[in-house]
Image (cartoon, helix red, strand yellow):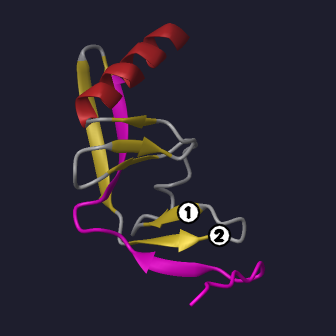
Amino acid sequence: MQKKYNPSGTGLFDAAPGTYLVSAYFDDNLVDLVSCNVLGWQVNQDRTLTPMVLDPRAADEDPWFVLHPDGRVEASDGRSWPNKDAWLAEERKTRRAVA
């Protein structure tokens, strides 16, 4: 059966267990990783996804980052990394360049 998309509607589906919205905060060489369980995904009218989490402000940062159960990290802007360490290394490098 073919799926019909209604432009005025949105959909919801469950996230895989072990999916987290993550943020990294750097202080010198230390990193503080804050994670929030992703309970599900909301399909927006433009067919983009938004993570559903308990903290309504968690996905306010742009871009936001998702740690998947298989270890991959994906950003809301389409970038991805094979693991958390690769993501943190690039984030550290980017923040140093800005400072």
Q: Residues within 10 Å of mark 2 (few under 14, many from 20)?
A: some
Residue segment shown in magenta: 1-26
Q: Residues within 10 Å of mark 1 (few under 14, many from 20)?
A: some
Q: Which residue appears farthest toward the front when viewing the image?
A: 1
Q: How many numbered tags mark residues here?
A: 2
32 in the magenta segment = no
Task: Report x, y in % for residue 65.
Answer: 43, 45
Amino acid identity at mark 2: Asn
Tell me the element at label 1. strand
72 vs 97: above or below: below
33 vs 70: above or below: above
Task: Report x, y in % for residue 10.
Answer: 64, 80
Q: Nearer the viewer, residue 55 or 14?
A: 14
The residue under label 1 is 49
The answer to whether 5 appears left or right of 85 in the picture is right
The residue under label 2 is 44
Task: Report x, y in % for residue 95.
Answer: 46, 18
- C-beta proximity under 8 Å, tags 2 and 1: yes
8 vs 34: above or below: below
Amino acid identity at mark 1: Leu
Residue pictured at 57% horizontal, 81% vertical: 11
